[in-house]
Amino acid sequence: MTQIKIFDTTLRDGEQSPGVNLNQLEKLEIAKQLERLGVDVMEAGFPASSQGDFDAVKKIADTVKNSTVAALARANKHDIDRAYDAIKNANKKRIHVFIATSPIHMQDKLKKTPEEVTKTAVEMVSYAKSKCEDVEFSAEDASRSDLEFMATVIEKVIEAGATVVNLPDTVGYTTPKEYGEMFRYMKENVKNIDQVDLSTHCHDDLGMAMANSVAGVQNGATQVEGTINGIGERAGNVALEELAVAFEIRKDFYPYYTEMTLNEIKRTSDIISQLTGMAVPGNKAVVGRNAFSHESGIHQDGVLKNAQTYEIITPEMVGVQSNNLVLGKHSGRHAFQDKIAQLGFDLSEEKLSEAFLAFKQLTDRKKEVTDDDLFVILTDIQTDI
Ligand code: KIV
Ligand code: ZN
C-alpha cells in the first residue's frame, strides 16, 4: 500500500470561491479542524495577496503543529519573501511557488517566452530553497502545456531544489487518460523524478476532478491537492473527503491509503460550510444531507435488515451519528414500524394498521412526514378506544 499525502487548499484555492471571504479567526478555526482531520499539508493562504491574508497565514503557522503549513507565492522574490515571513515560525513549513507553462498563459498572460519562464522558475525555486527546505513547484495549466517543454522545466526545478512538483489541471479541461499519461510521461522522462513527490491538483469544471486525481495517483502521483466539500475557484477543486473515503472503501481495488482521520470528516465539512456560507448540496457524496438517507420503501426495508444492502459507507466512518430513514410516500410498513418504536409507541397490529393508513394519507399531502406529524397521528390512535 502506498501512502498518498493529502494537501488541503481549502484556505487558499477554497477561499477563492466567489463570495467567500474568511477573516483571521475563521481561517484559524478551519486550520485547527484540518489539523484534527489529519491533513499532511494545509495551504494556509497567499500572503502577498493582502495584509489580512498574511496575518491569517502567520497566525496559522504559529499555531498548527502536526500538519505542514504551506504558503503560495508567484514566481517573484516579493511573493516568496512574504510567503516565507508568514510561515517562518511553523513547526513544518513549505513555500509553494507557481508559474504557468501552457502556451496561452505564457504568451497572453505572462508575456514571456518559454525560455524566460524556465529561467524564472529555476531562479525562484532556488531563491525559495535558500529560505526554506521544503519547496513545492507548480506548473500552472500543466494539462494544456507541451509535455516535452514541461519535462525540461521540471528537471531543472528539481535540480534547483524543489521537493514537490505539482501538475495542475487549472481549468478542469483534462480527461483521466490524458492526465494519467502526463504523470507517466514525467515519471519516464524526467531525471531524478523519484526524488520528489509528484502532485495532482484538479479543478472540476467538467465534473472530472475526482476521476482525474485518481488517474494521476495511478500513474505515480503521491500527493493530491484539493479542498473539503470541493469548494474552490469556479466549479471548485476535487473534494478530498471523497478521495480519502474511496481509497478506504475500495482498498480491495486501490493500493493506496491516506492518513486522514475519516471520522472527523463530517465535522470539518460542517464547520467549513458554516464559515464560508457555502451550503453543501444535499446529494453531495460522503457529506451531503442525503448521503445516508433512504426514502424508498424497498431501500428502507433492506437497510433495516442489513444496512449494507444500500449503504457502502457507514455513517460512523465519516462521523455522522446514524443513517436516516426519511418517512415519505415511498416508505413501507417496516420503516414505519421501526420509527414508531423509536418514538416510544407500542401498538397492537390493528392500531398499527390504522396508524400506517393515516400516515400514508398524510404523505399524499406532505413530502416528508416529521416526528411531530407522527406524534400527532400516534397519540390520536392510541387514545382512540
Ligand atoms: O489551479 C491552479 O493551477 C492553482 C495553482 C496556483 C496551484 O491553484
Ligand atoms: Zn487551483
Image: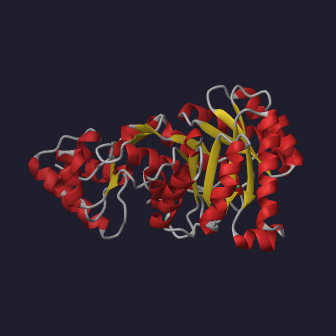
Q: How many marks?
A: 0
Which quadrant would residue 54 be assigned to in this image?
Answer: top right
Q: Quadrant of ligand 1?
A: bottom right
Residue at left 46%, top 64%?
176
Q: Is residue 148 left or right of residue 123?
A: left
Residue 50 shows in this picture: no
In the foreground, 383 or 131: 131
Residue at left 77%, top 37%?
129
Q: Is residue 288 left or right of residue 297?
A: right
Residue at left 75%, top 48%?
97
Please identify the quadrant where the N terminus is shown. Answer: top left
In the foreground, 322 or 176: 176
Q: Is residue 297 left or right of residue 175?
A: left
Residue at left 81%, top 47%?
124
Which quadrant would residue 63 be assigned to in this image?
Answer: top right
**Residue 351: horizontal and vertical position, in percent?**
15, 51
Residue 300 shows in this picture: yes
**Residue 126: horizontal and vertical position, in percent?**
79, 42
In the image, residue 191 above or below residue 362: above
